[in-house]
Image (cartoon, helix red, strand yellow):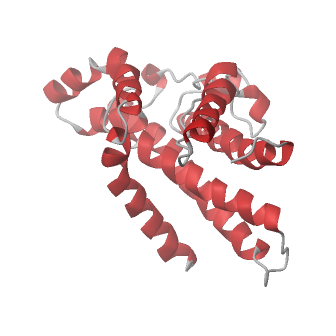
Amino acid sequence: MDFSLETIVLWAVPVVFAITLHEAAHGYVAKLFGDRTAEMLGRITLNPIKHIDPVGTILVPGLLLLTAKMMGGAPFIFGWAKPVPVNFANLRHPKRDMIWVAGAGPLANFVMAFLWALLMQAAEPSGIWASDGLLEMAQIGISINLMLMALNLLPLPPLDGGRIAVGLLPNRASYALSRMEPYGFIVILVLIAIPGALWTILGPVYKACAYLLSYVTGL
């Protein structure tokens, strides 16, 4: 993998939109269920600039790409945007509505993967927008969004899957799981540091999401 301007653009566009629109989806669904915190702070927007975190959206993904280049392996992209503020106490039914607010992020990633798949079809040599560059960007967009979807579905707070699990579990188990939230990202970083560990966990989820996308799009 070279680090030409073209390569940076091909990766930057899908990564930035995958991470930032994921957060915007949380804010939009929170508004639907009664919490307008994100709306009042201007965070329900498709403008990536409103969501970019210099470290999580730019530095960390960039370092992971650089590491992949140096080691000659396939890049694993992990990152985050500025979290959209959600006041769960404002939700009409906090425990139940938390499930929908949390699930909005992974669903947004699946929708984006679907749109990138449509672009990929159009960018193929026989497509209406035949372009090698667009084709490669679309392929990256699909893989990035499916990876972030799979990662965020892990039942580990503060990931979306953890919040979904907190909303679904009985009160005692829900409380016990929610207490893990301060340590969730530490667990993720440890798994990233152990070669192959995170993919062992995410692989089946990623493949299931990819199969579902293939079924929906016919790819």
Residue at 28% across / 32% down in the picture?
166
Q: Which quadrant is the C terminus positioned in?
A: bottom right
How many marks do you count on the picture? 0
The location of residue 116, given as percent across then percent down, is: 67, 61
Answer left or right for 78 relative to 13: left
Query: Residue 212 at what x, y percent from top left?
Result: 44, 68
- The answer to which of 38 and 134 lies nearer the viewer is 134
Residue 57 on image: x %, y %: 65, 29
Q: Is residue 41 visible?
A: yes
Residue beneath the point at 52% across and 42% down:
76
Q: Is residue 152 above or below residue 54?
A: below
Instruction: Please state which of residues 39 and 7 is positioned toward the viewer in this rendering.
Output: 7
Residue closest to the far front: 71
Residue lying at the far bottom in this picture: please name it: 126
Q: Residue at x 61, y 25 (%)?
A: 56
Please report the residue visible at 74 percent of the width from the left and 41 percent of the height from the top. 12
Residue 154 in sight in this render: no
Taking the image as shown, residue 214 lies to the left or right of residue 195, namely right
Q: Quadrant of residue 204?
A: bottom left
Front-most of 3 and 212?
Answer: 3
Q: Considering only vertical position in the picture, is 112 above or below 95?
A: below
Image quarter for residue 53? top right
